[in-house]
């Protein structure tokens, strides 16, 4: 069972991207019939707030963004309900800081929350459009399982009053996203590089509480494809481009392009990245990246951000963005040979910016097959 749990957590956290068939109504398609939307939905913020007042939510700064006035307002209003039965249920699953299985359960809460809404009688109900995600046979949908306690929390904590009072703040964050994050530019760039992959809509589900982990889900029917990314709020100081914020959303958006292509190269990726110790070391949740496919996709999605930066930022900003990405991947995320991979990818692209994605995959996989690290990067 332990091995099964580790495999399952790897699939959930490390893929960052899930594909599910949906039952889109004409009204839903019309609502989302534009390339780029941003939302901070009531039902989703409810789940984040419940996790924020859990034991881990009050102690793990890698899990929750504790740096904002909003986080402290959440604590001030809701902390008195930390012993509510629903919060105790959360504590039983999300029980350790910076812990893969705890983060896995957080993702299960968040992915299922997408499918719900809060009705006029203050009850959480299934929306009948986006599918529920049970994640694994041994992990039940906690929102369905504990709906009675969630409804009790909604009423007793006066959640809807809190959300309504903060609606102007949420709206301002949405406007900040639309103003400062060039998602349309990102999608158009990716569409050019991946001409066989198209989406009708990208929706950013943001929350000022989210720090980690981010994820993407893809939904489709016969005529409509939607990608939904769950990320934190974008931070901008109006003095310079927040390339880290751009990267956070770009590396979720491009999973929706990279993962389908990687599926076609699965066997070769599996053989090329078989020795995981060459590409990542233990720590900072890298145990979730337990397969060559997952590791390669992280290298490629972050590498493509470097190419986007070269095409869309001035030279100095692009240089800073690329170096920041390399440092984050190596020293924080423990993908120890990302700099070499990234610089090879950049060299390939600068020599031929019209290179196809198939040529990129073929060349980078051949390079990776022959790669011999000079030494282990300890991150010191």
Image (spheres, rainbow, N blue to C red):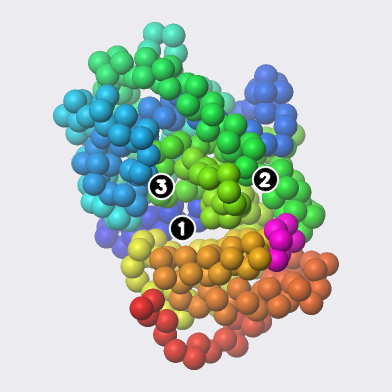
- The residue at 31%/16% (across/down) is 158
- Read off the magenta span: 310-315
Residue 266 horizontal side relative to residue 209, left or right: right
Q: Are marks 1 and 2 in contact (CB under 8 Å)?
A: no
Whole-percent x and y of residue 150?
30, 23
| Looking at the image, residue 239 lies above or below residue 42 | below
From the image, state whether disc 1 or disc 3 is nearer to you.
Answer: 3
Q: Are marks 1 and 3 in contact (CB under 8 Å)?
A: no
Marks 1 and 3, how far apart in space? 16 Å
Whole-percent x and y of residue 168?
50, 22
Q: Which residue is mark 3?
A: 211
| Quadrant in which the C terminus appears | bottom left
Q: Which mark is residue 182?
A: 2
Q: Are marks 2 and 3 in contact (CB under 8 Å)?
A: no
Mark 3 lies on a secondary structure that is loop
Mark 2 lies on a secondary structure that is loop
Marks 1 and 2, how far apart in space? 25 Å
Q: Is residue 146 magenta?
A: no
- The residue at 29%/27% (across/down) is 146
| Looking at the image, residue 348 lies above or below residue 58 | below
Q: Which residue is mark 1?
A: 14
Mark 1 lies on a secondary structure that is helix
Marks 2 and 3, how far apart in space? 21 Å
Residue 59 horizontal side relative to residue 261, left or right: left
Q: Residues within 10 Å of mark 2 (few under 14, many from 20)?
A: some
Q: Earlier in the sequence, mark 1 or mark 3?
A: 1
Q: In the rendered image, which quarter is residue 285 located in?
A: bottom left
265 and 182: which is toward the camera: 182
């Amino acid at each position: 069972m332990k091995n099964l749990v580790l495999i399952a957590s790897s699939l959930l956290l490390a893929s960052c991207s899930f594909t599910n068939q949906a039952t889109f109504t004409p009204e839903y398609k019309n609502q989302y019939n534009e390339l780029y939307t941003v939302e901070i939905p009531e039902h989703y913020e409810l789940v984040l707030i419940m996790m924020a007042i859990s034991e881990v939510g009050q102690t793990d700064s890698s899990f929750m963004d504790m740096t904002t006035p909003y986080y402290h307002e959440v604590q001030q209003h809701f902390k008195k309900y930390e012993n509510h039965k629903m919060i105790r249920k959360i504590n039983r699953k999300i029980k350790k800081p910076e812990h893969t299985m705890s983060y896995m359960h957080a993702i299960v809460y968040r992915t299922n929350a997408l499918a719900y809404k809060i009705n006029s009688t203050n009850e959480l109900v299934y929306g009948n459009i986006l599918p529920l995600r049970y994640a694994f046979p041994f992990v039940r949908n906690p929102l369905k399982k504990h709906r009675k306690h969630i409804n009790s929390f909604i009423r007793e904590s006066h959640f809807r009053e809190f959300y309504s009072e903060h609606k102007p703040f949420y709206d301002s964050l949405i406007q900040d996203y639309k103003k400062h994050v060039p998602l349309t530019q990102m999608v158009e760039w990716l569409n050019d590089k991946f001409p066989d992959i198209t989406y009708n809509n990208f929706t950013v589900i943001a929350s000022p509480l989210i720090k980690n982990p981010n994820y993407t889900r893809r939904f489709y029917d016969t005529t409509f494809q939607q990608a939904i990314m769950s990320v934190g709020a974008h931070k901008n100081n109006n003095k310079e481009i927040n390339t880290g914020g751009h990267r956070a959303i770009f590396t979720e958006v491009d999973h929706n392009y990279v993962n389908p292509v990687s599926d076609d190269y699965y066997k070769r990726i599996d053989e090329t990245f078989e020795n995981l110790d060459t590409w990542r070391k233990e720590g900072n949740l890298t145990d979730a990246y337990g397969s060559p496919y997952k590791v390669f996709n992280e290298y490629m999605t972050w590498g493509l951000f470097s190419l986007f930066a070269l095409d869309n930022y001035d030279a100095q900003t692009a240089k800073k963005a690329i170096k920041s990405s390399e440092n984050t991947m190596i020293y924080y995320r423990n993908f120890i040979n990302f700099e070499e991979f990234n610089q090879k990818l950049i060299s390939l692209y600068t020599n031929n910016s019209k290179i196809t994605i198939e040529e990129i995959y073929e060349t980078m996989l051949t390079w990776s097959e022959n790669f011999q690290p000079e030494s282990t990067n300890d991150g010191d």
